[in-house]
Amino acid sequence: MAAEIGHSQSPSKYDRLIAAAKSVPPVLTVVVHPCDETSLRGAVDSAQAGIIRPILVGPEGKVRDTARKLDLDISGFEIVDAAHSEDAAAKGVELIHAAKGEILMKGSLHTDELMRAVTAKAGGLRTDRRISHVFVMDVPAYAETLFVTDAAINIFPDLDAKRDIIQNAIDLYTQAGFGKAPRVAILSAVETVTSKIPSTIEAAALCKMADRGQITGGVLDGPLAFDNAIDLEAARIKGIKSEVAGRAQILVVPDLEAGNMLAKNLAYFAKADGAGIVLGARVPVVLTSRADTPRARMASCAVASLYANARRQHAPTIAA
């Protein structure tokens, strides 16, 4: 078995991730409204890399015109015609229900449009698990592949929602081949429990929930401030002794605003790439943005592919 990802500092964490995805069968992927360069090229590049097999859902004329303008070959892809972006989202979800895809991928429509179709009470892709988002981040200065959750879906999650957010992230980490028993840091402004900061109380409760088997598969600690979650010396100075402090692999933020700012700080100050994936639905949902680098877009597809394959069989461990 190959070594796990993230045990030595490297600028090529995504390269190993993409290589691992190439080693499993490409996954049938429903690409919703791929009508601009970012979304269509991302699907084509990932298909050419052998990571996904796309079904393109959108206005057929517009999809083909975009491909012609960009000189992209989509001749081998199935195209499902849709009147507009909202119709494309609805038809994409219908294809998942019809077992014609194992991944749903966002194209050039607003995230809200796609997620409305995914979360619809009638005909959506809900499960009994809360839907949440994970940024899988390649931070050049950090030894680990870093998960940040939830920075895109749940605005002010309560305790039960945070339980699902954590469980979703742990399941992705373990099932997609990143390793076993990830170290989960539940972030707040401080590392001590105080009634003045509610997120510290929730962090402590979540750790106790893990002790009681309500969250499984990971090692939790919190509350932790950001510095002592990711820096061993900062943890030592504060006298924090735990398996997680200074070595976190999953960062659980208090709310969406904090998570969004953290992810963007890592992207713009630390030059990190961030692959985005939504979990807790019937299939993984790939969320890309116009700001994503080509490598980040392909990494998003790679994470989703590994996770989708793991639903059928054990995915390979990502090579170090």
Image (cartoon, rainbow, N blue to C red):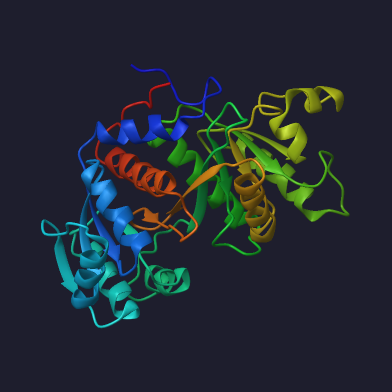
Does 291 sit left or right of 189 as displayed?
Answer: left
Residue 320 percent across, percent down from the top left: 43, 21
Q: Nearer the viewer, residue 294 or 159?
A: 294
Does 261 sit left or right of 201 as displayed?
Answer: left
**Quarter that holds the N terminus:** top left
Q: Residue drawn 61% across and 50% down?
A: 263
Q: Is residue 179 visible?
A: yes
Q: Residue drawn 43% across and 54% down?
A: 280
Q: Residue drawn 38% across and 36% down?
A: 176
Up the image or down, 108 lies above or below 218; here it is below
Does 311 sit left or right of 61 as displayed?
Answer: right
Instruction: Name the quadrant containing residue 108.
Output: bottom left
Up the image or down, 317 lies above or below 35; here it is above
Residue 291 percent across, percent down from the top left: 50, 57
Q: Residue drawn 36% across and 53% down?
A: 284
Residue 161 percent across, percent down from the top left: 58, 57
Residue 91 percent across, percent down from the top left: 25, 73
- Total labels: the figure holds 0
Up the image or down, 123 lies above or below 186; here it is below
Q: Is residue 214 visible?
A: no
Q: In this view, which residue lies farthest toward the bottom?
A: 83
